[in-house]
Image: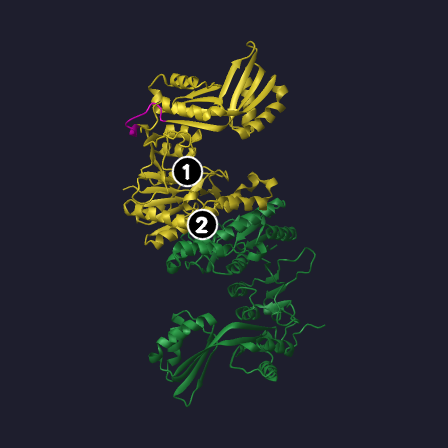
Chain colours: A green, B yellow
Amino acid sequence: MSPIVMKFGGTSVADLDRINHVADMVAAQAKESPGGVAVIVSAMAGETNRLVGLANGAAGSDLVGEAFDDEYDVIVSSGEQVTSGLLALALRRRGMKARSWLGWQMPMLTNQVHGKARIEDIEGNGFPEAIATGEIAVVAGFQGRTEDGRITTLGRGGSDTSAVAVAAALKAERCDIYTDVDGVYTTDPRIVSKARRIDRISYEEMLEMASLGAKVLQTRSVELAMNHGVPIRVLSSMAEPGQDNSGTLVCDEDEIMEKQVVSGIAYSRDEAKVSLLGVSNHPGIAADIFARLARSNINVDMIVQADSRGPELANMVFTCTERDSDLALSVLSEAKDQIGYDRIIVDKNVAKVSVVGVGMRSHTGVAEAMFDALSSKGINIQVISTSEIKISVLIDASYTELAVRALHSAYGLDAVG
Amino acid sequence: MSPIVMKFGGTSVADLDRINHVADMVAAQAKESPGGVAVIVSAMAGETNRLVGLANGAAGSDLVGEAFDDEYDVIVSSGEQVTSGLLALALRRRGMKARSWLGWQMPMLTNQVHGKARIEDIEGNGFPEAIATGEIAVVAGFQGRTEDGRITTLGRGGSDTSAVAVAAALKAERCDIYTDVDGVYTTDPRIVSKARRIDRISYEEMLEMASLGAKVLQTRSVELAMNHGVPIRVLSSMAEPGQDNSGTLVCDEDEIMEKQVVSGIAYSRDEAKVSLLGVSNHPGIAADIFARLARSNINVDMIVQADSRGPELANMVFTCTERDSDLALSVLSEAKDQIGYDRIIVDKNVAKVSVVGVGMRSHTGVAEAMFDALSSKGINIQVISTSEIKISVLIDASYTELAVRALHSAYGLDAVG
């Protein structure tokens, strides 16, 4: 009998009322889980920001950086510590056996990269045994401990990763991520009213959806779940008892019987297109450009290179987040002479729209259908990039909704009725 | 070269401004302390109350008790954790080497009595070594860890005790307790304007002063300092650099050259007198009465027994805090038949006034001088109790100030000029 892991984010534990609601859900789950229950909690909504504000004030905002991150982690991790104690109390009030587990107690061992540490191991000193006795483990998410005993945090959204890591360590039956939506949708329901909740989606598809801006699950948590074969279920933390709350199961492709060619349409408006025009084209030029960007920690997404006025000159186009594009502009402008190019243009008025589906591996014609649908609405494609299970296009940002709706219909994703 | 230990309470670290002021004081101390510095901090003022409020809300105030105290400790200890991180950051901002140490990291081992744990040992795994390298240790006060790895707290005011325990473990030169007064006074300056700051006071005297309501230092911290021979200095956390801030040194009697017969006058208004009249006097009756009170955790202070209308009947009078007196009344009323007495009277309109001084051991006439001074002001003494270095009397509460002033003059404690 494997345990069940449940995870609740900051808005789900925002105040004592919400914590009591969560305690009801956990108590109900515990009664039907003979293998035991572990619950991972975030800080109460707003608390992390308050603590970061205090830390910045103490450090002097001009001095923020690596030399301070270890103490940031000490300060910020206290938010999850408080929630775990509160939920344990609320569960005991309901007659359940429960106790809090902090990152250092399990211990959740991480590397030394304070502020965005990676989990290396859960030693689970007494932790699985406690759960096996029927005691609900309330785990403070987002936090860990280095080998030499200092507190670390996993970075924003790290509680999802904590939950999956705990589920993997416990060989849990499932990791249920309770959130403010009731599952993963074929696309953003605010744009397409006929968007449908997906019953099952593969890890690979979820990764593409998540990294493309469908912000339901943290990318790292999905990767970790995929590597350890932990099924994740995304479901609503607001549901009342008795209400349908089956959510979306993120699992292995093999466990999905009826595969769609395309599972969903994702989009992201936080995109900028940087064009270097008239680059003198010689071997190593691309490596030089992208090494400079990498050194400044700029995450480059799509890359296109094409000849410009003959083979000696090329145009180099890439995309990154809007925020990174300002830095990219200054880095590349400073190196204009070393790189050798005519002109640099940054366009922030772009959006990326993607179709995602494991079915693409075995079906042809997916790209054609996409280009057809967009052209029939008069939408111009600026950049195309593809992966095994995804096709993305960069378009004028003002066409985002139109494109998403057209593609959602074109691939037969609209809900019936 | 021994380290110096400094301790700052909640009002001294109430906000970022105060924390910056503390950082200045610590940095200055570190520059003149080649043996290194450890700083113990409390939670920011108000924070502990906020956390206790949350914990009570989650537990349901009707269910507070031992079965919940372990999680209370998890929640409440986060307050000191945050302050220790903030002060470490503020010190680094000043170019100092500093890091936070939490109770579990040192580790500060305690017994399992959550909510009011007692320190058993400081293992100091790497802790003294870090201080010896010149890194300022910023220790979260008030908190410890059990042998099996759970967080404990030491009870209200426990940060004083943390500080002395750290000082003892480090064999510190001195433990400086920074507070909102600039030292220990011969009596309460709000009552006697001519009260003087005491330069040096013995541990024993300080214990009598503290337990009698001169609330500068926590009693347990003074006991611990006495047992380990740690000199404590009480001084102001508000002093500006350059200002006289020599405070009061609490030390061994031998280190005080000029001993006063009486060092100070203490008083307490939180007293109640409980009188059992017409108790049938037989062997074991006192043991029976006080065993009942002890079982209800009532702390009895003064006790007087005298015959009442002949030797078969006695009057039994004792004092306790006002809050405990209600419980005492109900405990003793319920057992009226078993104990066998006529009447019980509770009088909350009483105060205890005490003269304290190690000089009493070698000087006679101290008690007579006290009774003279009080009778000359027409103050009636209800109960008398004495210890080796203290004489206490219970009087009508409305005479408290008059009595304190009269005694302060009578023993020559008034400041000159």
- Farthest bottom residue in view: A310
Quarter placement of the C terminus of chain A: bottom right
Q: Is residue B386 magenta?
A: no
Residue B259 in magenta stretch: yes
**x and y percentages locating residue A12 in the rendered image:** 59, 56
Q: Which mark is residue B161?
A: 1
Mark 2 residue crowding within 10 angstroms, few (<14) / some (14–19) / many (20+): many
Mark 2 lies on residue: B82
Looking at the picture, which amino acid does disc 1 mark? Thr
Name the foreground residue: B57 vs A84.
B57
In this view, B236 is above or below A104 = above
Instruction: Give the extent of the magenta segment.
Output: B254-263
The chain that hosts pointer 2 is B
Give the residue at the far right of this rendering: A417
Q: Position of residue A391 (x, y in %)?
A: 55, 77
Q: Earlier in the sequence, mark 2 or mark 1?
A: 2
Going by the numbered disc 2, the residue's amino acid type is: Val
Picture coordinates of residue A236, whole percent (x, y): 62, 60
Left of B292 or right of it: where is A105?
Answer: left
Crowding near pointer 1: few (<14 within 10 Å), some, many (20+)? many
Does the residue at mark 2 contact the one at mark 1 (Cβ under 8 Å)? Answer: no
Disc 1 is placed on an element classified as: helix
**Which of the 4 quarters of the picture holds residue A72?**
bottom left
Give the percent coordinates (x, y) of residue B49: 51, 43
